[in-house]
Image (cartoon, rainbow, N blue to C red):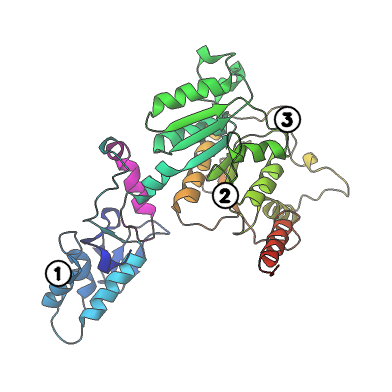
Amino acid sequence: MTVREMRRPRIKPEHRAYRTVDGHVRIGSVVHGIGSEVKDPDGWVWTLVEAMDGTRDTAEIVAEVSRRHPGPRLPAADIVQAMTDLTTAGFVEDAGAAPPVELSERERERYSRGMTLLRWMDLRPRQSAWEPQLRLRRARVLLVGVGGTGGTAARDLVASGVGLLHCVDPDVVELSNLNRQTLFREHDLGRPKIDAALAALRALNSDTTVTGERREVRGPEDLEALLAGAGGRGDGPAYDVLLLAADRPAVIRRWANRVCLAAGTPWAEAGYRGPLVSVGVFTPGRGACWECLRSAETERRDLRLAPGQDEDAASPRMPWNPVNAMTAGLSGSLLAHAAVSLLCGIPPVDPGYRFGLNLMVPGEAIEQRSGRRPDCPACRAESAETEAEAAGAGTPA
């Protein structure tokens, strides 16, 4: 979407500009990662952003800026280029764009606050500010595990307007779950989690489709079947994103990584370990895979273990994972946030990383990043297989 294609270019309300004491123009709010500062010695950039108020088309904006700053030093082409630069940076929307007909008036009212947040965080030109919400509405998400982390992620995605959410969990609701699995109530005790979760989620938002099944993941073939959808599909995965919120068996993340690499499906996994809450975000072919990141982190840490000594000596495993509603809720919301990022590109981040919080040290973020590793047994194998298939496809019979 270029500025010339817009009916009435407007600086996004959340990105409203202001002038600094030294005459510079600050735009995009003061949020790190969004805002920018533009030098404006002649004052016409400020005139430009004021004129881009949604009441004029491109030609009228150029005329207004030229009228207030006459002379050969400011050709119309420079004004249009400045508008283009602002648009490319994500600060401009089309005030004349009609909302997508696919979104009902009820949905637009329901998601109006969420749309403005996505618009604030969005740094790419769109035909409509509603486009990210429409992407959510069209999205199909597979969620494995609806306990503390998964239940919160499910709640947040359904409230945010994801189109279809399919939930998978084998367990029943137990009393010890209720300190952090906030989808469930005391009257759900003994009930299959999937049944209680579906009832709660459907009551939250009737404009989304929520399905589920009581099923245990016992191996990678179970994840493959789930990704293929009911009865399997011959044209690829049935879901746009896989969210993993299950912590058993212990190897399930490795399974998910291999299965998503083979299917080409973006995925995210989240959880808590004491006061540490985090989420990992992965897209096959872009950045590190889960095994790349895990190997890099193992090399980075210096646990000073004796040769052959198990890592659990430094980070002991409990019969259960200590947790409360806050740590589970934070990890679940991070998982939902990761899903929105993968589905909508907001915020625009490079996948292949883990981030989160250390609640013991306010302000200390968890961040792990790594490039793809040439020795990775997972994505290296997938890359080699893909390259071989491509070479074979290009060879005449």
Q: Are marks 2 and 1 in contact (CB under 8 Å)?
A: no
Identify the residue at horizontal 77%, vertical 42% (top origin): 314
Q: CA distance from mark 2 to mark 3?
A: 31 Å
Name, please, the residue furthest toward the left.
Answer: 67
Left or right: residue 3 versus residue 171 is left
Left or right: residue 114 versus residue 220 is left
Front one among 382 and 51: 382
Q: Is residue 125 magenta?
A: yes
Q: Pointer 2: residues within 10 angstroms few (<14), some, or many (20+)?
A: many
Task: Name which residue type carries label 1.
Answer: Glu
Task: Name which residue type carries label 3.
Answer: Met
Identify the residue at horizontal 34%, vertical 52% (top origin): 119
Name, please, the residue furthest toward the front.
Answer: 397
Q: Quadrant of residue 233?
A: top right
Which x, y percent locates residue 54? 19, 59
The span shown in magenta is 107-127
Left or right: residue 54 versus residue 248 is left
Q: Which quadrant holds the C terminus?
A: bottom right
| Residue receiving disc 1 | 60
Q: CA distance from mark 1 to mark 3?
A: 67 Å
* Labelled disc at residue 266: 2
